[in-house]
Amino acid sequence: VYRSIDGAENWSSVGLVQEAINDIVVHPNNPLLVYVSSWMGLYTSHDGGDHWSVRHPDLSINVTGLVMNPHDPDIMYAGTWGDGIYKSIDA
């Protein structure tokens, strides 16, 4: 995962180097809250990408897509490779 803090002029790595990233979703009301889906699961950062943690151990599978409801960011959907779609109503 790479992050820019100057309008995409410069980029720096913020971790998850060994992961194959599928989606990155930034919370619309809190830009420090970032979700990343990857081949190895779903990760979150509460500090804009400085630190990452596995969001939910049940999603330690290939999460191929991640969508946040634009009207209610606590509702999210995670699509997986061969294991269906998961829904969260508590962010």
Image (cartoon, rainbow, N blue to C red):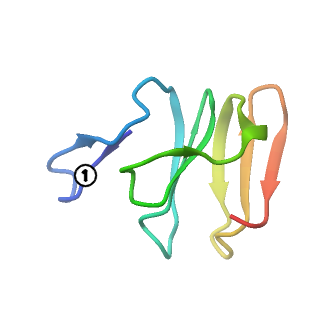
Quarter of the image with the C terminus in it: bottom right
Residue 42: x %, y % from top left: 63, 42
At a point 63% along the width and 70% down the height, the residue shown is 70
Question: 54 and 8: which one is in front?
Answer: 54
From what the image shows, is residue 65 above or below residue 29? above
Q: Amino acid at mark 1?
A: Ser
At a point 65% along the width and 54% down the height, the residue shown is 67
Which residue is outermost to the left? 9
Residue 82: x %, y % from top left: 82, 25
- The local secondary structure at tag 1 comes to loop
From what the image shows, is residue 59 above or below residue 77? above
Residue, disc 1: 4
Badge count: 1
Where is residue 2, by image quadrant? top left
Residue 71: x %, y % from top left: 66, 76
At a point 45% along the width and 23% down the height, the residue shown is 18
Report whether 85 appears left or right of 28: right
Quarter of the image with the N terminus in it: top left
Which residue is outermost to the right? 84
Label 1: few (<14), some (14–19) or many (≥20) C-alpha neighbours in 10 Å? few
Report whether 67 appears left or right of 36: right
Residue 24: x %, y % from top left: 50, 47
